[in-house]
Image: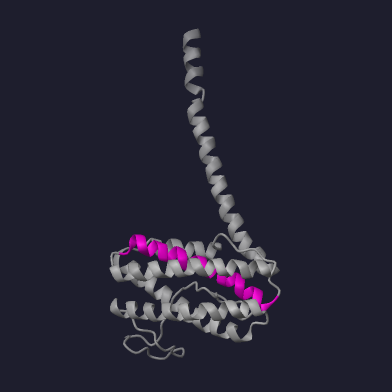
Amino acid sequence: MTSAMAQQRTTDSPNPSQTNQGQTNQGQSGAQAGAQSGGSGQVSAELQKADTPDKLFLIHTAEGNMWEMQLAQAAQQKSQNQQVKQLAQRIQQDHQQMAQALQKVIEQQGLQTPQNLSPEKQHALQVMQSQSGEDFDKCFLSAMKADHAKDVSKFEDMSKIAKDDAVKQFASQQLPTLQQHYQQVQQTAAACGLPSGTEASPAGARIPGSGNGTSSGTSGGTSGGTSGGSQK
């Protein structure tokens, strides 16, 4: 009986290596969750501190810039279309340079540059990354087309209406690059069978070259959706 009880105790005792591994996994998961929560919380915190339209524009631009870089990086990895890969490479490189200039302006305003996407943008990125082949290419190009249309419009406005000279200069300097991106995105989109999107259509209007009366989609954008009237 003594032998049987000892055997039972041995069977019931947890394996130290399994226990340690479980604790390690839990620790890693907790750290990852904390990093994501902290990053997304930072976006919200910086937006709360942004008390002028100029500052809102900068924080929305920072998150949108991050979104476009990460999506462009995914396109370089997932796309099988060389034209799409080249476009994504240019977008990522140019937006990395923009991020450096943007960080200086943000710090001048007494704010911090967000280091992670908001939960909404993280989810959108995961959905995009779940696509493959031509489906991914078209989703990527559609997002880039919508984002850069908003970017160009917002940066044009801020290059004229920003109250802070550094913000106005930043918008003016980055605008030509965004215009070039938008042009290249339109050309690549047309080559992949998407509407050119050269002109915005009113709600309910027929889009040239499409069979539908309306178009819809989800996009991030460098300048956001709301930045005291702005957002990427």
Q: Provide residue 207's location: percent of width, then percent of height.
A: 37, 88
Q: Main secondary structure of the magenta part?
A: helix
- Report the residue at 44% width, 66% height from top: 93
Indicate the quadrant where residue 189 lies: bottom left
| Front residue of this view, candidates 10 and 72 | 72
Residue 105: % across, % down: 63, 70
Q: How many marks?
A: 0
Coordinates of residue 14 in the picture (x, y in percent) = 51, 26
Quarter of image, res 217: bottom left
Residue at 38% across / 73% down in the picture?
141
User: Can I make out residue 114 in this image?
Assistant: yes
Q: Relative to residue 40, is residue 54 depicted above or below?
A: below
Q: Residue at x 37, y 64 (%)?
A: 75
Position of residue 174 in the picture relative to residue 206 (left or right): right
Viewer-proximal residue among 124 and 170:
170
Residues rendered magenta in the picture: 52-79
The answer to which of 10 and 1 lies nearer the viewer is 10
Residue 33 is left or right of residue 133, and the answer is right
Q: Was residue 72 drawn as part of the magenta stretch in this picture?
A: yes
Q: Is residue 1 visible?
A: no
Taking the magenta stretch, the answer to whether it contains residue 229 is no
> Vertical placement of 227 versus 157: above or below?
above
Res 60 → quadrant? bottom right
What percent of the width, then of the height, locates residue 35? 57, 52
From this viewpoint, which residue is outermost toward the top? 2
